[in-house]
Amino acid sequence: MSYLLRRGASYYARLKVPTDLVAIVGKKEIVKSLGTKDLREAKRLMWPVVGEWNRQFDDLRARRELTGDDKADAVWQHYSGTLERDEQTRQSMPAASEIEAATASAMEHAKREALDARDPFAVLDASLDVRVLKRRREQDAHSRRVKLELMRKHLMAGETALIADEVADYLDRNKLLIDPHSSNYVELARQMMRAEIEALQRTLERDSGDYSGIPKDPLVKPAIGATRETAAPGERIMDLFEIYARENPRGISADTLNQARRDIGFFLQYVGDGYPANKIDKKAVRGWKSLMINFPVKATESKAFAGMSLQQIVKHNEKVGKPLLKPRTVNRYLASLGAFCTWLVSQGYLEQSPMHGMSLAKEKKVSTLPFTTEQLNILFKSPLFTGCLSATEWSKISKPGNEKIRDHRYWVPLIMLFSGARPAEIAQLSIDDIRQQHGHWIMHITTEGNGDKTVKTAGSMRVVPVHKELVKLGLLDYHAGMKAAGQTRLFPQAERNSRGQMIAVFSREFGRYLTRIGIKKGRGLSLYSFRHGAADALRRAGHLDEQFGFILGHTGGTMTGRYGILPEGMLEQRVKLIDSIAYDDLTLKHLASM
């Protein structure tokens, strides 16, 4: 993997610095220790690091361009800052009473000095000191009038030297990388000069006690766009997200947290890596949502959009014409940011969440459908379960042959059919998670034990008895064989993808397999159809949803669920519940004999 580097026994993330940014970054490659010697863990930790680096690169590129919002912000900051400094100067000026007191004191002192030293110039010196004090206001007003006149002349002549220091200060504070010889720089300088001309005019009006003046130049007005303000150390959005992820107030799964991390990374690509969390507002969210609505599917994986910012991708797609994200996907992005913003409110970083009312209207949802008995019979007599042409190529798995598949691809659908468990929960089971308790075989769905097991919520940890039909089909024999072979996992070939999602590839390919064997046409059927079918089977057996929700992992977390120890009576009730799952006219005898 090009992003992964091994030094000795330890793994590091690495990334080449884009050629156009080498001079700014100061190096051609960046490397960071992942703090692990385990390859699987390194792969999981690597992606957030690489994603963060890419966001920083995007932010650096964005800071080489001045946006309209940048210029508006610079103009208003300079105008209001000039007036604020003027007011501070006025407040530091001596009042009339102070001047009179100073005059009297100086004259008295000078007279004593003159009498004692017979110095005729002592009175004159004291008089000059007071006159300088009195003229401070006049001199300040004169310098402002002179500067105003010069500023107007320089603006007409296209000269920017008078404003150069102020422009440099604004660029430095906002970490903008603008070439002083570029047209962008000149335009910003001229606009800031217009702001100062307006501010100086206000100061002259104040000299006569008039504080009511407002800018006459239409360019000089309060900025309402996004600013380049940089968050304080430790308070960047991703810094706070990692705290949010550790606290995990909603108890969501690691997969969901990783998804949220990527979603919020997209938001940062829009507002900038250093954007302060306390500045997240409806305008920022609205602008990002607008981009997401017009964002092409899998754009970041497409060569057609390589190296482009979000805005550039959306603009280029007007020519390329790739399909756009569906509303439910956009809503998922918004939901990830919304949950994080709710936490920011609870921690005092935001006064209120900007996400209210931001979701798109829900499209008409195609619900996941359970399989019919006819479809199940076709499926379990298909090559995946009876013998295929090749066990490694999905295009050949749908064709009859002599290759027998008996790994997770075979067992996960069957276990789902007779338990209603989620596919990832089954795929990550360890050998020790299948065991006997009070004379009954159980599956313990938990995060306890070795490995990187995850569950959707704390309530997903639970004890599910092994259905009698699974015993007939040979699940316990398979379990015994894997244990004898020294395996620690029930399905060692079941893997997570680069995003940490368990058997995501199988889940995707299974849907395509259903299409190849003629069961699926359009949407509605998937691996999750088994879970819905199990729920329907429990209802057919006369059980209410609230009576079997815990079997499907729909209840709050308990210590029983975590450690898998049930009283005998409670386990007996669960055995009866699970064994009531039945499918009329379903034929599986051929699998038991194979």
Image: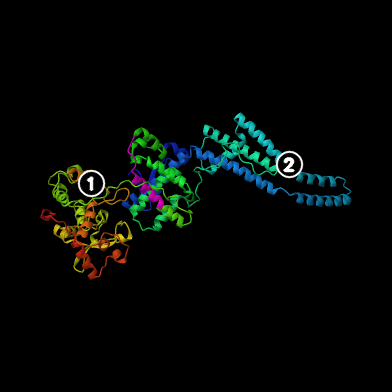
> What residue is shown with label 1?
511
Q: Which label number is shown at residue 249?
A: none
The amino acid beneath tag 2 is Glu
User: Quick one: SS at disc 2?
Assistant: helix
Which one is earlier in the sequence, the residue at label 2 or at label 1?
2
**Residue drawn at point x = 51 percent, y = 40 percent:** 70
> What residue is shown with label 2?
138
**Residue 182 percent across, percent down from the top left:** 52, 32
Query: Magenta residues?
Result: 321-338
**Residue 180 percent across, percent down from the top left:** 54, 34
* Membership of 336 in magenta stretch: yes
Picture quadrant where residue 163 is located: top right
* Membership of 93 in magenta stretch: no
**Residue drawn at point x = 62 percent, y = 35 percent:** 162
Majority SS type along the magenta span: helix
Asked if residue 561 can be seen in this view, the reply is yes
In this rendering, position of residue 62 left or right of residue 556: right
In this rendering, position of residue 371 left or right of residue 35: left
In this rendering, position of residue 505 left or right of residue 372: right
The amino acid beneath tag 1 is Gly
The answer to whether 64 is drawn above or below residue 482 in the figure is: above
For this rendering, which residue is in front, 261 or 527? Answer: 527
**Residue 532 percent across, percent down from the top left:** 23, 54
In this rendering, position of residue 138 left or right of residue 369: right
For this rendering, which residue is in front, 528 or 521? Answer: 521
Asked if residue 441 can be seen in this view, the reply is no
For this rendering, which residue is in front, 136 or 181? Answer: 136
Mark 1: give few (<14), some (14-19) or many (20+) Cα within 10 Å: some
* Image marks 2 and 1: residues in contact by CB distance under 8 Å: no
User: Quick one: SS at disc 1?
Assistant: helix
